[in-house]
Amino acid sequence: GENVEQHPSTLSVQEGDSAVIKCTYSDSASNYFPWYKQELGKGPQLIIDIRSNVGEKKDQRIAVTLNKTAKHFSLHITETQPEDSAVYFCAASIQAGTALIFGKGTTLSVSS
Amino acid sequence: GAVVSQHPSRVICKSGTSVKIECRSLDFQATTMFWYRQFPKQSLMLMATSNEGSKATYEQGVEKDKFLINHASLTLSTLTVASAHPEDSSFYICSARGTAYEQYFGPGTRLTVT
């Protein structure tokens, strides 16, 4: 089955810096890759997603890139702010609506 | 749009009792919902896939007789933890699948079994 590896497990940046989180997946059939932000004691919130027919997608300060050949995708956050501090999860799923397989998460800390 | 609610948000029960958790999609219909379990500082582990009007599909290692799932309508799925024990204490989160493949998560239910 699918396996998703996520790095780094923790990431500390200064306010205004960029943050990059990387994920690799094992199943070449996966074609949907969402990113979630989870704050303490809350459910994950979908922040951006990308499908396999697209190489890059951007939404304001957040962008995701996908390299299907290498089977990896990354989350880029620019101009980080303290409120970006949270745990970020990448995930992958196969077409036809199967469940998401999650990475282990990255704890992002943005200090002002 | 795409709001998913869970009830209750927090429950404390005694060992041996059963607990029901509700998951509702408030502004869309979801033929498929998913139930996850999350331990502190860990990732989400899929427990089961719930399809409206049919039996749930459980992941390997998840006891279907202990974690009873019912998806009776397009907006409601319930998870019942039967005869709960302290090791069942965890954060239970549901998600509902949107019109494409995106999933929207509920706020989670913190279960503590004493």
Image (cartoon, coloured by chain):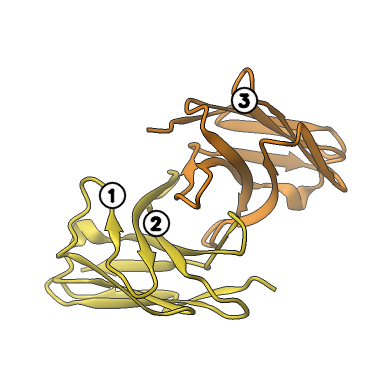
The amino acid on which the numbered mark 1 sits, given as a three-letter code, is Glu
Residue indicated by mark 2: B36
Task: Decide if residue B35 is on the left or right side of residue A68.
Answer: left
Query: Who's the residue at 17% across and 71% down the image?
Result: B82
Provide the chain ID for the residue under circle 3. A
Task: Check if mark 3 and mark 2 are on a common chain.
Answer: no
Task: Say the numbered circle drawn on residue B59.
Answer: 1
Between the C-alphas of marks 3 and 2, the distance is 24 Å
- Badge 3 element: strand
Residue indicated by mark 3: A72
Provide the chain ID for the residue under circle 1. B
Q: Does the residue at mark 3 contact the one at mark 2 (Cβ under 8 Å)?
A: no
Q: Judge by depth and name the residue closer to the eye, A36 or A56.
A: A56
Q: Which chain is yellow?
A: B
Image x and y of residue B45, in percent: 38, 48
Q: Judge by depth and name the residue closer to the eye, A66 or B23.
A: A66
Q: Judge by depth and name the residue closer to the eye, B25 or A38.
A: B25
Q: Which chain is orange?
A: A
Query: Who's the residue at 65% across and 39% down the image?
Result: A108
Provide the chain ID for the residue under circle 2. B
Query: Who's the residue at 81% across and 47% down the image?
Result: A81
